[in-house]
Structures are given as structure tokens and as C-alpha cells.
Amino acid sequence: MFLLVVTPVLLILVSNKSAVSEQGSRVYKNLPAHYRCFRGHLLRGTHRATSRKLVRFSAWKMASAKNGGIARTQLRGGFKRTMMGLRCVVMLLVLLTALPVRADITDGNNEHMKREHSLTKPYQGVGTSPSSQWDFWGSTLVTSQYVRLTPDERSKQGSIWNTVPCFLKDWEMHVQFRVHGSGKKNLHGDGIALWYTKDRLRPGPIFGNQDHFVGLAVFLDTFRNDQHGMDRSFPYISAMVNNGSQPYDHSKDGRPSELGGCSADIRNKDHDTYLAIRYSKGRLTVMIDVDDKNEWKECIDVAGVRMPTGYYFGASAATGDLADDHDIISMKMYQLMVEHTPEEDSQDWTKIEPSVSLLKSPKDNIDDPTGNFRSTPLTGWKVFLLLLCALLGIVVCAVVGAVVFQKRQERNKRFY
Ligand SMILES: [Ca+2]
């Protein structure tokens, strides 16, 4: 049913594909900086362009109906129409393969920035006074342009923490950051960690924060400690959910406890670099925008994650023998408007213990870093493959239909 409704729209979209994407990207670029990388807005921009294409589509349909009588008498015309139909099916296939990814980004939610959990220039309300919403520690330096967690010097640690606990059930945090320094290739470290944890301002050995933390961490690890883990390049971004029982193993770059991750070239960039963490309905997604293309690239996507409300957002960084400037430019928190079942709403969300239901044993995790996602019910990839198979079936049917139709037309012509 859905396909029946959207197919005509998609066909027109395809025939004017370049125009639509141009329109979409223009809308995208005109957005304020903090919205620019939010693909939901890009999606809505594309929809606006689509409505104009729909008007054109109606006009084309009417013209086709008018000329239909003539076309039907010509075998060539019939063949042309068949070929056009075939082309449309193939193009629909191409378009639909991209569709699940896009639809996945916003889930149709509205989003609202929450100032009490956001850190933006010129960083008013950052300090040690009782009314401040952000508190900092260690080597952290707050200027009007950036919050420098560590300078490009050895053995520094710094952090910044939101003083207001977050009671939102579904949220998305956008972090603009900068990692830069004089260190040449592989001679820099250690990286930044972003936190959503029970405790705040607890200095320690994990990128400037305590080990055995309770909550969520996303690590932007710029230094390879594990010389055996050459199958991945650094900097490497990974996520970890902990109930306080697991240690973070620096010597293995956190691999035994990670939920997933990706390599990302984030150092010494002239352009802005962003990372987004989304938690909604038990699904944790980490996306990055570090290539100056104004678009999110998926890094981590894992279901079965349970996290409570009432924890604190923070960021920390550390240097060791090697160093870097670790800067946070902004942290913007968006509330996601998501409906929950009455059972979910009646639960006390502050009592939830952080956990991941699909996490395999650490040993399995080392052998197969992506293994966590295999048992996830219908991940984006599985839906994608299912759709691909279904559409391939449609294409085969269309080709067979076209051949039969053409043969029949030829036979009719000979008969007359
Ligand atoms: Ca490391």
C-alpha cells in the first residue's frame, strides 16, 4: 500500500533527481550552523521540493492521457512506454535503496534544543557559582570561542560537566569539537570522552574521568595503545555502556567492552567537526560529520540499550606522553518527541540500570567487533537487504512482463 502511494512521487523525484538534490542541499546550507548537520531538516527541504514536482506530475499525466489514443495505435510507442516503465522501476529500485537510511535518521520526530543541557558560545553560565549550569575541572580553559579541555602539553587532564541532571527519555546530543596539535602522525594523544553518567566531576584515568563509571561513554581515541589491533585505523570512535562493573582497558583501546565503533580522521582539520549521540527507545546511535560534507555518517547503531534518566552530560580529555589541544566548541542537547507505551511511562526511569541486552561476552567481542549487531532484530541492513530482494523480484517480473507484452503487440500487428 505504501509503495502504491509513494511510487508516483518517487518516479517524478527520479526524473528530476538532480534538481531535487540541488534544492535540498540549498535549503540545507541556508540553515543556521547548529541545524545544518541535522539531516531531518534536509529531509524536510527535499519534501518541499517534492510538492512542486507533484504539480508537474499531474500535468504530465493529463498530457499522457490526451496523447494516449495516438500512442496506442503505434507499436513503437507501446514499446517506448514499456521501456520507460522499466526504467522507472530500475530507478525506483535505486532510490528505494537510499530511502531506509534517510528515513532512519529522524524517525519522524520533532526535536527541541534544551538550553539547560547545552553548552554554547560565549559560554555564559559556565563556572563554579551555585547557579552555573556547567562546571569544569583540571586543565580546562574556557574562552569566548572554545572550551579547551587540555592544551597541547604532556600529562594534562580536564573536564566540563552539566550540573543539571537530564530527565529526558529520548534525546540527541550534538557535539562540535576540535582536536589539533603539533604532533605528527601517531605522535599525539590521547583523546576526548563524552559522558552521560550517574556521577559527575570524578577525575580518573579514563580520558580524565573515573574508571568503572555508571552510564554511557563515547570515546574519541586518537592514540593506538594496542599494537595488536592493527585491523583498525586511528583515531577510533567507540561507545561503552557500563553499570560500574566493567573496567575500561586502555591497553586494548577499550575493545573488550565496546558496543561498536568506527575509524574517523578527526585531527588537525580546517573545517568544523561534529559528532551526534542519539538515545531513543533503547537504541543508541552515534553519527559523525567530519569530512566537511555537511552530512551525517553512521558510526555506531545498536539496539537493546537501557539507560536511566537523571544522569549528567559531560566531556573530558587527557594527554599523556603525547598531547593535543582537545577543544569543545559546543554541546547541543535536543529533546526527541517520542511516544511511549503506558507501561513504559509508568516505570520509574531513574531506577533503570545501564545495560545492553545484546552484548556478547567480551571474548566474542574481541574476535568479532561487529558481532554485537548480528542478533539485533531487523537492523537497518536487514531491512535494506529484504527491500533489495523484494525489488529485484519486481524488476524480474517487469522484464518478463515487458517481453510478453512486446511479443503480443508484434503478433497483433501481423494479424491486422
Ligand atoms: Ca587509546
Image: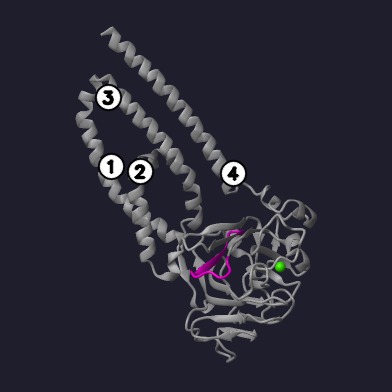
Upstream in sequence: badge 2 or badge 4: 2
Residue at 56 percent across and 40 percent down: it is 385
Secondary structure of the residue carrying tag 1 is helix
Q: Does the numbered disc 3 mark a residue whose Cβ is under 8 Å from ligand 1?
A: no
Per the rendering, the mark at residue 382 is: 4
Q: Residues within 10 Å of mark 4 (few under 14, many from 20)?
A: few
Could you give the CA–CA distance between mark 2 and mark 3, rounded to whole angstroms?
Answer: 24 Å
Indicate the quadrant containing the N terminus: top left, top right, bottom left or bottom right.
top left
On the image, the x and y values in percent for residue 394 come to: 47, 31
Q: Which residue is mark 3?
A: 77
Q: Are marks 4 and 1 in contact (CB under 8 Å)?
A: no
277 falls in the magenta region? yes
Could you give the CA–CA distance between mark 2 and mark 4, rounded to whole angstroms?
Answer: 25 Å
Q: Which residues are magenta?
A: 266-284
- Vertical arrangement, residue 90 with respect to residue 156, above or below: above
Which is in the foreground here, disc 1 or disc 3?
Answer: 3
